[in-house]
Amino acid sequence: METRRTQVVIIGAGPSGLLLGQLLHKHGIDHLILEARSPDYVLGRIRAGVLEQPTIAALNEAGAGERAEREGLHMRGFDLRWDEERCHIDFGLIGTHATVYGQTRITRDLMDARAATGGITLYEAADVRPHDIESDHPWVTCRHEGRDLRIDCDFIAGCDGFHGVSRQSIPKEHLREQGLAFPFGWLALLADVPPVSEEVAWINGAEGFLMCSLRSRTRSRYYIQVPADEHISQWNADRFWDAYRSRLPSDLAEKLITGPALEMSIAPLRSYVCSTMRHGRLFLVGDAAHVVPPTGAKGLNLAVGDAKTLADGLRQHYQDHDAHGIDQYCEHALKRIWKAVRFSWWMTHLTHRITDNPFERQIQIAELEYTRESVAARTAIAENFCGLA
């Protein structure tokens, strides 16, 4: 078995792992990234596209934010729609904006930045396993290009998602987990067609939730609410467009342009938090520790926040010989995470058909009408959407 030594092993080369690697490089901290999949597979993941300003700042700090700043679309608000009614959430109320820039492009930018620095990423690393995470000398094993590797390190960062090995490596008796599964999911379609709305729209329709989202002036991503047990094989682009158009408010339905699907998928909606974000020398980052419904556009932003918090703590540990940052990682991260989980949960309940109970529908309409009439309510939504500290 070949043996290597580094200071930090990062498991997972998605945006959080790549960003963490770039920040560690900037601080002069030796590290290595292990990724189970190929670069093309990682780049093929279609995910979030709304970035908070702290996320843009973190990308800039990592040397990977220039293109997002230049090419990203400024999102200055969004619409809440129900029936034929509308409420506009103006981010000008809090003096900021969000940025629309797809996760695939973020991943590409981070890959390019990493290549420029000569950072090591071992793609298609099989059977990745953390060991001795409760000791002062953890290590990770994997198989790469036919060789068995052992990598000795000081710390391990688990950036490998909800189904990854990192959280599974923490003994169950130490895991503190809370979660809620919704009885529905989002059916998504990506197409090279102009967006139906100049701003993103969340629509509470009589038959369920709809979302109009945009990746650029010529690329759109649309969503509709479907039952949790729905299977993607039941859908094609024609059926999607028919269902989508029939549920849209009339003014948007008239503007809808359809086209071939570049990608279709169904994502379940759930809220989940593993409060055990650190166990020994293993830290959980991003989806490895928490999952939120996409309704609040928080998943990627939370992952970036985790990576930034951990990078700052590790810099403090190595440069200042001060463990306060890594010792406070969980507490610091969870305060931000639970606020985002609450907002995503609330937005989901506001915009989706939760049950067939007409009382709940009337409560939603009352909430939406109150929001339209109240500057304070719209300001609170804008604050939460654009990111709380």
Image (tube, rainbow, N blue to C red):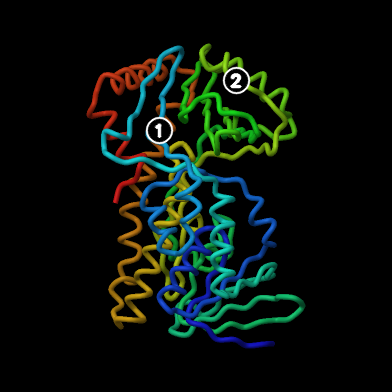
Q: Please tell me whether residue 329 is drawn above or below residue 41 in the rendered image.
A: below
The residue positioned farthest toward the right in the image shown: 146
Task: Identify the element where label 2 is drawn.
Answer: loop
Q: Nearer the viewer, residue 25 or 308?
A: 25
Q: Give the residue drawn at x 40%, y 69%.
A: 311
Residue at mark 2: 256
Quadrant of the frame with the N terminus: bottom right
Where is residue 77? Give x, y as percent: 38, 32
**Would you say residue 354 is visible in this rendering?**
no
Q: Give the residue drawn at x 64%, y 54%.
A: 43
Q: CA distance from mark 2 to mark 1?
A: 25 Å
Where is residue 205? Give x, y as percent: 50, 18
Task: Identify the element where label 1 is drawn.
Answer: helix
Name the kind of residue labelled 1 in the image.
Met
> Going from the N terminus, do you reach mark 2 or mark 1 first?
2
**Would you say residue 323 is visible in this rendering?**
yes
Q: Nearer the viewer, residue 350 or 322?
A: 322
Q: Give the residue drawn at x 61%, y 46%.
A: 46
Q: Nearer the viewer, residue 289 or 358?
A: 289
**In this picture, residue 52 sits left or right of residue 182:** left
Where is residue 4? Give x, y as percent: 59, 86
The residue positioned farthest toward the front in the image shown: 70
Instruction: Please name which of the two marks, 2 or 1, marks the residue nearer to the observer.
Output: 2
Task: Assess disc 1: are there few (<14), some (14-19) or many (≥20) residues with their C-alpha within 10 Å of its C-alpha.
Answer: some
Residue at mark 1: 347
Task: Assess disc 2: are there few (<14), some (14-19) or many (≥20) residues with their C-alpha within 10 Å of its C-alpha.
Answer: some
Number of numbered discs overlaid on the protein picture: 2
Contact flag, marks 2 and 1 (Cβ < 8 Å): no
Where is residue 330? Give x, y as percent: 35, 63
Q: Give the residue drawn at x 65%, y 38%.
A: 265
